[in-house]
Image (cartoon, rainbow, N blue to C red):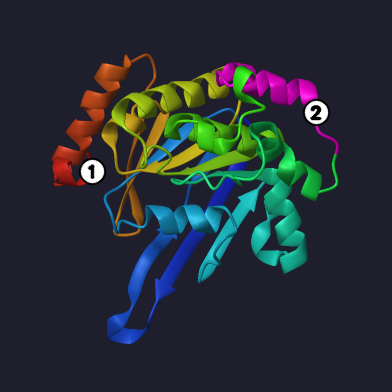
Amino acid sequence: MNTILQTINLKKYYGEGENIVKAIDNTNINIFQGEFVAIVGKSGSGKSTLLHMLGALDKPTSGEVIIDNKYISTMKEEELAIFRRRKIGFIFQYYNLIPSINVWENIVLPIGLDSRRVDKDFVNDILDTLGLKEKKHNMPNTLSGGQQQRVAIARALASKPSIILADEPTGALDSKSAKVLLESMEKLNKDLNATIMMVTHDAFTASYADRILFIKDGKIFNELIKGNDSRNKFFDRIIDVITLLGGDVRDVC
């Protein structure tokens, strides 16, 4: 399998001496092309810090992040900005759409900023997969929260990045909208072979992934692979791991 993202002995420390905080502590992970991976942990576990370093939004204290065989720690700021735009798609909890332009314009804006040609057929395929084809001329304020988050997903995918990084993508949605969004992400992963890495505190959200990495105190401490399990069975296994390792299910779910 082709490795899209890799970390080597990744660390992020704050403070020093007795006051040192090990937000990420010697973490090694591999994400392969076409995977849908979730990082699960409670608030303060280090999952968002890890995602920010993977997305080159923050620099590690030491260690390496490698995306598409490129060591991003060696890049200068201008090179890194271009790399982020072309190779990494971001989905945040709050949609970050520009209210004064329509859905289509929001989706293709990053491509235009990078002076590249828009693959209209590909963008239309994404819109079709996400159930947004009839909404592409709508303004963001005419859409529901779930629809706006799907626009954000389309924007992340439109530039054909190597990987999509999603930070609590269902956090601002009601349960029905969250389910639709997760089904859309699952469909993009299966139909378009999109590589997705998502951080979440929610076991139900994580159950849509194919593989789960559990994080606690800045360390990856366990892994689950869905295999042929149903989603309900996988959800039960997620809960079992949290319970067996001494976690409070209420903290994660």
Q: Which mark is residue 16?
A: none
Which of the 4 image quadrants contains residue 43? Answer: bottom left
Q: Is residue 27 visible?
A: no
In the figure, 182 relative to 140: above or below? above
Q: Which residue is mark 2?
A: 119
Which of the 4 image quadrants contains residue 4? Answer: top right
In the figure, 187 relative to 49: above or below? above
Q: Which percent across, then down, holds residue 144?
A: 45, 31
- The residue type indicated by label 2 comes to Asp
- Do callouts 2 and 1 mark residues in contact (Cβ within 8 Å)? no
Q: Is residue 140 visible?
A: yes
Q: Label 2 vs label 1: CA separation?
A: 39 Å
What crowding class fits label 1: few (fewer than 14 Cα within 10 Å), some (14-19), or many (20 or more)?
A: some
Q: Which residues are magenta?
A: 117-133
Q: Residue at the location (35% across, 69% down)?
A: 22
Q: Earlier in the sequence, mark 2 or mark 1?
A: 2
Q: Which percent across, then down, holds residue 21?
A: 33, 73
